[in-house]
Amino acid sequence: MTPPPTPQLADAALWQDAAFSPPQQPVDVSQLFTLSDEMQRYLRVELGPRLQSEGRLRGLYRALQASRQLKLDYDARITRTAAEAFEARSGNCLSLVILSAAMARALGLNVHFQQVQVEASWSLAGDVLVVNDHVNLVLGQRAQGSVWTDDSGMSLVVDFLPHELMQGQPSRTITEAMIVTMFMNNRAVEHLLSGATDDAYAWAQAALRRDPNFTPALNTLGVIYQRKGLLAPAEQAWQMALRQQPDSPGVLGNLAAVQRALGQTDEAARSEARLARLQREAPWGEFRRAQVALQSGDAGTARALLERLLKRDATQRDVHVWLAQAYLQLKQPEQASRHLALAVQHSPTHEQGLYAGKLARLQAAVSP
């Protein structure tokens, strides 16, 4: 595994170790790509005949992408190691890319990681908006330029989002070290959302020691400090993040809020003005406005905003859920039922029961 780069930021200027206890479990990514015994057995016994008949590259590709083979379930909210994703048969795009890379390497295949330049995916976790970039995996060797092939000239991209969303989208090659940093930051966010702030701090710190300029981890660190009441360090982390990515709506929104809390009225106003310009293009900005409208009783405005979001991405289950609530306020239970059904359809397997239960209760309430 590639060693972490030398930190470029002075520890004393960034860290607040005295405010945090040691994590319950040490930060460890040494097993990130390690195959479990069950994974090795799968490759040897279950996948072996396909590999012999179709070749290692195409055989693994078909197993990863065909629903009747590994039956991997895309779950945008959970990050897992290769072994954890295999055992659960689910994970977000990063988890499934890690799983795919581990299996491909075990078969002696070359792997190359890519970050796909699509609109970042987002989801709601309590009161926290979680925004994620998208990554995928290319199996083969670089031939010329950006063309990837195996020895027979074949190029295969492993991606766990629908093909029609990814077709023609630009991408850039990223290193394994970046994949590891992304994993660390995701773990930090997940610990933060579960209330384990000390663990979140340890993972965010580890991510930034590996890549001190990784904007998502700087943003995460700021949120961790904010949750701890460390407002000045939170502002510092977000200012560092903006130096790396000046037009990040998420970072600007966080910064504006903490500047208000610190009494920095003029600075907050400038941050809010920049944010307003950026949020006109950001889908989660419209989603937040729809939430505010619905909570204030303006279901018509909420419905218009949410319907517009679905034209950009019809798979956002949070949008369907909130649109169902808007239709309930508008006394249109049939439309509410339709959008709850779509929320079920676009949810990972382990969450479908939650939305299905809501749908059943709604249908029972409106039945004559």
Image (cartoon, helix red, strand yellow):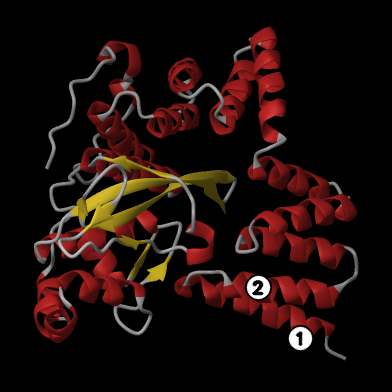
> Does 60 sit above or below residue 217?
below
Q: Which mark is residue 342?
A: 2
Q: Nearer the viewer, residue 48 or 319?
A: 48
Is residue 313 or residue 219 the one in the foreground? Answer: 313
* Mark seen at residue 263: none
Q: Which one is nearer the viewer's eye here, 6 or 363?
A: 6
- Which is more foreground, mark 2 or mark 1? 2
Number of marks drawn:
2
Crowding near the residue tagged with mark 1, few <14, some 14–19, many ≥20 C-alpha atoms within 10 Å: few
Residue 360 position, x and y percent, is 68, 83
Residue 252 placed where, x, y %?
Answer: 58, 25
In the rendered view, does 131 fall on the left or right side of 178? right
Residue at point 30% right, 82% down?
A: 69
Which quarter of the image is occupied by the N terminus? top left
Which residue does the image show at 54% across and 69% down from the upper left?
347
Q: Quadrant of the C terminus?
A: bottom right
Label 2's element?
A: helix
Q: Residue furthest bottom?
A: 368
Residue 81 visible within the image: no
Could you say which is closer to the camera, residue 178 or residue 367?
A: 178
Name the residue at 68% across, 37% down.
Answer: 281
Label disc, if present, on residue 364 of the rendered structure: 1
Q: CA distance from mark 2 to mark 1?
A: 18 Å
Chain-order first, disc 2 or disc 1: 2
Question: Where is residue 318 drawn, in percent x and y?
Answer: 63, 59
Q: Would you say 35 lies left or right of 301 here?
A: left
From the viewer's perspective, tell me whether residue 18 is left or right of residue 93.
left
Asked whether residue 136 appears in the rendered view, the answer is yes
